Image: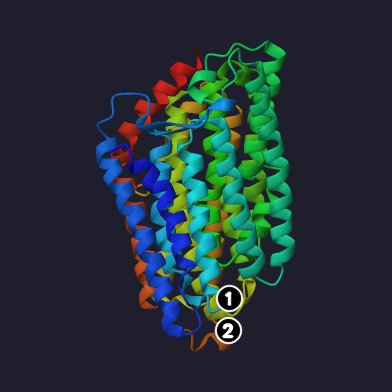
Amino acid sequence: MTFLLSSMVWVPALAAIGLLFFPARTDLQRQRIRSYTTGAAALVLALGVLMWYGFRDQSGTFAFEETRQWLPAVGSSYHLGVDGISMPLMLLSAFLFVFAVLSSGRVRENTKEYFILLLLLETGIHGVLCSLDYLLFFLFWQMQAVPLFLLIARFGGARRIQAAWKLLAVELAASTLLLLAILILYFKAPTHTFDIVTLHDLSLPVAMATLVTWLFFIGFAVKLAAFPFHTWFIDAQAEASVPVALILGGVMVKLGAYGIIRVDVGEFQTAFHKIAGAVVVIAVVTVLWSAIAALGQGDIRRLVGYVVVSHMGLVFLAAASTAPVAVNGAVLLLVADGLTAALLVVMAAAIVERSGTTSIAAMGGMAGRMGKGAVLWIVAALAAIGFPGLAGFVAQFLIAVGTYPSHRIATPLALLGTLVIVGAMLVTVHRIFFGAMPERHGRVRDLGTLELASGVGLASLIVLLGLLPAILMDSINFSVISLLSRGSG
């Protein structure tokens, strides 16, 4: 069973290599490429589900751990492993890549190149989530940046080039900070190594530990799209194609949150406490700023981006508290928001295609023509505001309960931001689906079979996780307790 984790990481890359030998000149050949890519994504999902059933019985810190010689001369090894923090995110990623491939039917040109980049992106994301070697982690981190840049630059909207270059510039800046932090750890270690588990026992001077913590934190915060680094994500979310936007909002920004929990909280908890005040301020500003921006947003795709950023601010706040209940809620929120963001992206794309505009003000009365789409959008909106019975409720409740004892002012302010999001989503639902319908919407059709299947599938997962959070929570809690205990020495 030790090869299952490597399989989940490398099957997409091997499938991408296989695509190089597919012809793509005719519609039939392009359809074969889509079917092949769908099969590869489904295989990764099947591996993830199989791993999850074995993973639930874990009794150690990491499950499916693999350690192999790779670059012994510099102290780096091929070290992989997952726990209750990374495994749910890998499972989320596998689900969302299946939905992304299924949503790629509108890609008519350069189909082969598009799916190759999408599969390489999946390998990069999964590699980040399971790497237990800093050098390996960094290489996977870079691996997912390049395909994402090309996917936006070649297959995005009218302003795709500007959005793609902005994303790449931010990625390079964040990566530079991460690499600097990793190299400091490497050269300060008595025995030069990149192994995360080994370096956990490294004792650094207070000033040096604080510097490394800041470097990691800023690098991950940029990826998480925290204020004031969020503009790259909003632009990319608005300009990316639907499948890429789904992955961007559903998985990519979660890598930054995962890094903060895994590295800053798990490896440098003492130093992280020293900067917790600044982190709390950034968290509250991120929640409030994004919520207010969402309330005044006139573009439906940018609205989705601001909702995601607001939720990431709650994750920041939970991480700053380092309270087990709050961190449990943060991990669960990453999964819940990933599913919610994906459903919002899919439904927003359907609405934009039928209305011919991304302007919310130009929409109206579409519930009469898009009954199924209206129901699914409302489900996604309710999930985004943390409605009871849906995935986001338990997560946001745990964060509020866990952070309030240590942050009695910041927690109510963050909750105020979630109330603003409630207002934004209610206003948006009314403006899109109710009221007077413009004449040009008279022939708007409801969701197609594939759109309906994707929407119902995502909504079902949101409801399932809302009603049965213990599916994930038992494993998440075990690993969060282990991580916090280990991080506190």
Q: Is residue 35 left or right of residue 72?
A: left
Give amino acid for label 2.
Pro
Q: Which color scheme is applied?
A: rainbow
Residue at the spot of label 2: 438
Quadrant hosting residue 241: bottom right
Give the image location of residue 456, x and y in percent.
34, 64
Q: Can you give x and y, in whole percent of width and height, for residue 469 in the image?
A: 32, 41
Q: Secondary structure at mark 2?
A: loop
Residue 289 as seen in the image, left or right of residue 344: right
Q: Which percent across, then down, holds residue 389?
A: 34, 48
Q: Which residue is mark 1?
A: 363
Q: Nearer the viewer, residue 236 or 398?
A: 236
Q: Can you tell which mark lies on residue 179?
A: none
Question: Mark 1: which secondary structure?
Answer: loop
The furthest residue to the front:
73
- C-alpha distance separating marks 2 and 1: 7 Å
